[in-house]
Amino acid sequence: MSAEATSSPAPATRLSRNAWAVFLLLFASYAYFAQGGGWSQNTRLGQVRALAETGSFVSNAYLVYLRDPARPDSPQVRLQLPDPAPPPADPRQLATLDLSYFEGRYLPNKPPGASLLAVPSYWLASAFGAAFDLTPDDWWTLAVQAWITTAFSVGLVGALCGVCLLLLSRRLFPELPERAHLASALCFGLGTLVFPYATLLMDPVVGGTLALTAFALLAWPRETGPGPRSLLFAGLLCGAMVVVNYTSVLTTAVLGGYALWRVRPRLRIGWFVLGGVLPALFLAWYHQEFFGGVLETANSHQPEFMNVSDGSAFLGMIQLPDPTVAWKLLFSAYRGLFVACPVLMVSLVGLAAMARRRAVRAEAVVCIAIFVITLLLNASFNGWHAGAGIGPRYLVPAIPFAVLPLALCFGRLPFLTGALAALSAGLMLVATSVHPLVPHPVQNPWAEYMAPLARGDSLVLGREQVTGPVSVNPTGLAESGAHRLYPPDSASAAWNSFNVGEFLWPHSWLSVLPLLFVQLLGVVALLASFRRAGGRPGSWEHEAGEASRPTSKDPVPAG
């Protein structure tokens, strides 16, 4: 064995170590935050509890919590609505209004995929609560269990998405240095809207991860095209996307077209279709069982105020795309993607460069198509702003495809891309630390909400009273609005949301320092690994616009 072979680690080992480092760094960042309550989180937590504790999808027993507001020390108790239950006299008694109601049964006004994903992590959270003898329906128990449930479901999936992007970036752009791929993956996980939404019990990050993983399976065998197992699993993931979010059917169509273009012989596309059959059958059963028809979606029975009043919209919410709304989704201070994540403007340059490379032109078309379709769909919603939130939440599933060519920018324009990535990461850290779910009436979330709260100011927005600098969400997991059960000066209002560092430095920016230290340590370790292994500089163009491909003499290291 040569001295060179014994003195340096095998490429597969080195690259696997980097992938694990990316995963751990992202997961630690996401699990650091507990974001508290809100309509979307509360409706899913209710269904998760129903599934984990009773085996039922129906949320009736997990939607109403009561306490005596005249007694500060009165316990919080859960009122179990019967199945079936009559409509409530006052809907504000419910923990959420993101609900569908059919024949006396309450379910989330969304497909059940995200809830199913979270059931195993809720079992883990329940075991944690039992170990510390926590009362199951107490406000603090709900806060801790929701934190663990979210971290080990949405947070875990988001971290895996960063690893998938790293591996796919290496495979599509093998001529680029490892530092470009690592920078792209970390920018995706910490410098885009994936960061704040990976700390919330919602579906955007889950949908984006399923889509990117399916795309990776279809794109991975560069020379031979996807085999039957890859096609089957990709189809299963695409079907699961629709079980997570109905609108993912459009992304599934794009990926199906890409699979049809790649597969040889064409009849092998049947494996892709077969993979989607099981999720489709499950969703059909779910609709039939709980909404009375295979094509009766959860949105068909949601509150009327969520629908277009004249009934002209598809699913009650979708009309023709509005160009003005599309512009706002990209450039407005209210919900602009490029305002929240300025590094994605550079990624557009990477997309153009990717489209010029014949070897990855089809993949560039897929990335552009998914992003544009998602944007147009968002611009067609009557509630395009997605209610409370930071940035365009409905565009989050398309962010992995917008970030994928960013490695090209880190390779060719490292200083500009790095500066914008650092700015984006700073904005995302502030949004995640303060409160990602900015009330939707706030027209400039950054200037009118994030900045004053980050300084430690107090704001009063309707019934909500929030005080900075960090973890300001006053809405609990048992109430549909702030202070409906607990007053502003209560411990519940103060600790509905929190981060790990606040157990040492409550309600202070000092609480974020441990996370920054971990992130800095992770980045230094990755840089050290790269320097030990040595790296070769990448080039913006390769052989007049065609990316290099691995050959039998130039294998791509496995991740």
Image (spheres, helix red, strand yellow):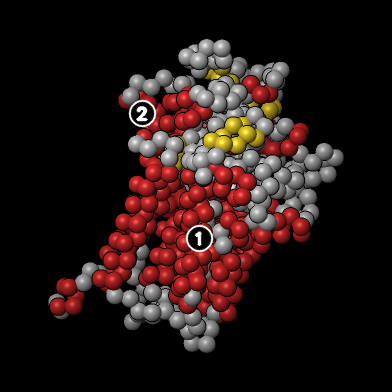
Residue 139: x and y in percent read 48, 24
Q: 205 or 475: which is nearer to us? A: 475
Q: Quick check: can you spot residue 117?
A: no
Number of the front mark, 1 or 2 = 1
Residue 250: x and y in percent read 65, 55
| Image: 33 above or below 124 | below
Distance from disc 1 to disc 2, alpha carbons, whole Å, reads: 40 Å
| Image: 348 above or below 334 | below
Q: Residue at x 74, y 52 (%)?
A: 380
Q: Residues within 10 Å of mark 2 (few under 14, many from 20)?
A: few
Q: Quadrant of residue 364?
A: bottom right
Q: Quadrant of the C terminus?
A: bottom left
Identify the amino acid type marked 1: Leu
Identify the amino acid type marked 2: Ala
| Image: 147 above or below 260 | above
**Mark 2, residue position:** 127
Indicate which disc, 1 or 2, sits on the residue closer to the N terminus. Answer: 2
SS at badge 2: helix
**Mark 1, residue position:** 423
Q: Residue at x 19, y 75 (%)?
A: 5
Q: Residue at x 68, y 47 (%)?
A: 443
Q: Residue at x 37, y 70 (%)?
A: 178
Q: Are marks 1 and 2 in contact (CB under 8 Å)?
A: no
SS at badge 1: helix
